[in-house]
C-alpha cells in the first residue's frame, strides 16, 4: 500500500471514529485491512449524508451539492486524478473487495431520498405503505449491508438477501428511536397504512413533543413496528455463518448493539417522545469485548465454526 493511500485510509478512520457511533464499535472487531475498507465506505456515505441533511440550505441547493459529490466520485472512479482522501481510499477498497460502482451510487442516492420530499413547507414527508417504506430502508440501510458483506467476504448468494433484511431491521430500529426528531423535521416514517389501522394521522402523532404520555393507540402502533423489526433481526442469525469467520464478530457486535437499542425502547414502554433512547457506552464496550473475545477464539481455534458467535 502506498503512503498516500495509507494516509487516505487514516483520514477515513478518523471520520468514522468521530462520527460512526454504533458502527465504529463493530469496525474495531474487523481485521485491520477490512476495517480500513469499511471506514472508507463510511466516510464516503457520511459526507453525502451531511450534504443532504444541511437544513441551513434550500432543498434545491442540497440536491445540487449531493449530485456534484456523486459526479466528482464518478470522475475519480473513471480514472481522473483526485486528492480527495475519501475517494483515494474508496477506490482502493473498491478494487480490493470487488464493490460495484452501482452499489456505491446507491449509497449516495439513499441519502438524497430525504431531500426529495414534498415541496410544500407545511406538508409532511410520509410513506403510504410498508412496501414504500421498505424501498426507502433498502436505499439508506440495506445497501450499506450489501457493500459491507463484500468486504466481510461470502460465497453463498443467500447472504445478499439476508444482508438486505438485516439492514431493514437496523433502519426500523432507527425509525423508532428517532420518531420525535424526524417529526420535528417534517418526516414521518411510520407507514400511513399502519397509522390508519390505529385511527391515527401523521400530524396527530407528530404533534407529541414529549409533553404528554402516549395514547394506547400510539403505544400499540410502536409496539407493532418493534415486532416487525424483531422479525427482520432473524436474518442476522442466518447471515452470520455465511460470511468469513474473521468478520463475524463485527456483524455480531453491530447486531447486538442494535438489538439492545430496540430492547431499551421496549423497556421504556415506547416513550420515544420523552427522550432519545440510547445504548450507554459501557454496554457498547461490553458487547465489543464479547465480540473481540469470540473473534480471538475463532482465530485461535483456526476453524470455521459459526457456533462460536
Image: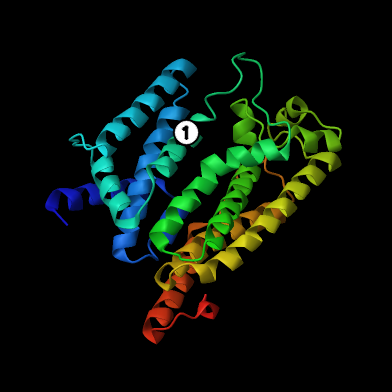
Direction from residue 19 to residue 78 in the image, left or right:
left
Relative image position of residue 245 (x, y in whole percent): 43, 73
Residue 124 vs 304, above or below: the answer is above
Name which residue lies at 59% across and 23% down. Answer: 117
Q: Residues within 10 Å of mark 1 (few under 14, many from 20)?
A: many
Here the colouring is rainbow
Q: Which residue is denoted by mark 1 in the rendering?
A: 109
* Front one among 291 and 129: 129
- The N terminus sits in image quarter: bottom left
Name which residue lies at 23% across and 44% down. Answer: 88
Relative image position of residue 47 (x, y in whole percent): 37, 36
- Taking the view exactly as shown, the residue that stands out farthest to the top is 120
Relative image position of residue 106 (x, y in whole percent): 46, 38
Relative image position of residue 53 (x, y in whole percent): 47, 29
Residue 18 visible in the current orientation: no
Count every numbered label the image shows and give the total: 1
Badge 1 marks a residue whose secondary structure is helix
Residue 164 vs 31, above or below: the answer is above
Residue 85 visible in the current orientation: yes
Task: Name the image quarter holding residue 162.
Answer: bottom right
- Taking the view exactly as shown, the residue that stands out farthest to the left is 3
Name which residue lies at 39% across and 46% down. Answer: 100
Name which residue lies at 45% across and 28% down. Answer: 52
Direction from residue 111 to residue 204 in the image, left or right:
right
Task: Name the image quarter holding residue 180.
Answer: top right
Amino acid at each position: 500500500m502506498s503512503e498516500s493511500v495509507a494516509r487516505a485510509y487514516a483520514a477515513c478512520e478518523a471520520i468514522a471514529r468521530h462520527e460512526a457511533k454504533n458502527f465504529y464499535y463493530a469496525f474495531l472487531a474487523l481485521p485491520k485491512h477490512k476495517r480500513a475498507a469499511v471506514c472508507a465506505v463510511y466516510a464516503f456515505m457520511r459526507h453525502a449524508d451531511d450534504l443532504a441533511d444541511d437544513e441551513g440550505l434550500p432543498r434545491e441547493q442540497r440536491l445540487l451539492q449531493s449530485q456534484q459529490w456523486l459526479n466528482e466520485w464518478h470522475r475519480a472512479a473513471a480514472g481522473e486524478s483526485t486528492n480527495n482522501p475519501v475517494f483515494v481510499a474508496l477506490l482502493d477498497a473498491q478494487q480490493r473487495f470487488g464493490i460495484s460502482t452501482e452499489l456505491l451510487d446507491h449509497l449516495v442516492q439513499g441519502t438524497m431520498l430525504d431531500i426529495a420530499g414534498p415541496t410544500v413547507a407545511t406538508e409532511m414527508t410520509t410513506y403510504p405503505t410498508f412496501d414504500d417504506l421498505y424501498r426507502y430502508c433498502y436505499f439508506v440501510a440495506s445497501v450499506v449491508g450489501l457493500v459491507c458483506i463484500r468486504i466481510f467476504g461470502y460465497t453463498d448468494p443467500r447472504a445478499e438477501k439476508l444482508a438486505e433484511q438485516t439492514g431493514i431491521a437496523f433502519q426500523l430500529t432507527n425509525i423508532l428511536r428517532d420518531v420525535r426528531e424526524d417529526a420535528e423535521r417534517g418526516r414521518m416514517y411510520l407507514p400511513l397504512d399502519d397509522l390508519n389501522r390505529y385511527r391515527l394521522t401523521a400530524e396527530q402523532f407528530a404533534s407529541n413533543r414529549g409533553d404528554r404520555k402516549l395514547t394506547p393507540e400510539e403505544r400499540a402502533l410502536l409496539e407493532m413496528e418493534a415486532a416487525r423489526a424483531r422479525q427482520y433481526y432473524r436474518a442476522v442469525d442466518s447471515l452470520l455463518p455465511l460470511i468469513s469467520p474473521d468478520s463475524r464478530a463485527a456483524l455480531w457486535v453491530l447486531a447486538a448493539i442494535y438489538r439492545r437499542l430496540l430492547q431499551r425502547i421496549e423497556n421504556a414502554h415506547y416513550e420515544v417522545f420523552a427522550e432519545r433512547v440510547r445504548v450507554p457506552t459501557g454496554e457498547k464496550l461490553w458487547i465489543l469485548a464479547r465480540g473481540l473475545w469470540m473473534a480471538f477464539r475463532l482465530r485461535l481455534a483456526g476453524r470455521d465454526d459459526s457456533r462460536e458467535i
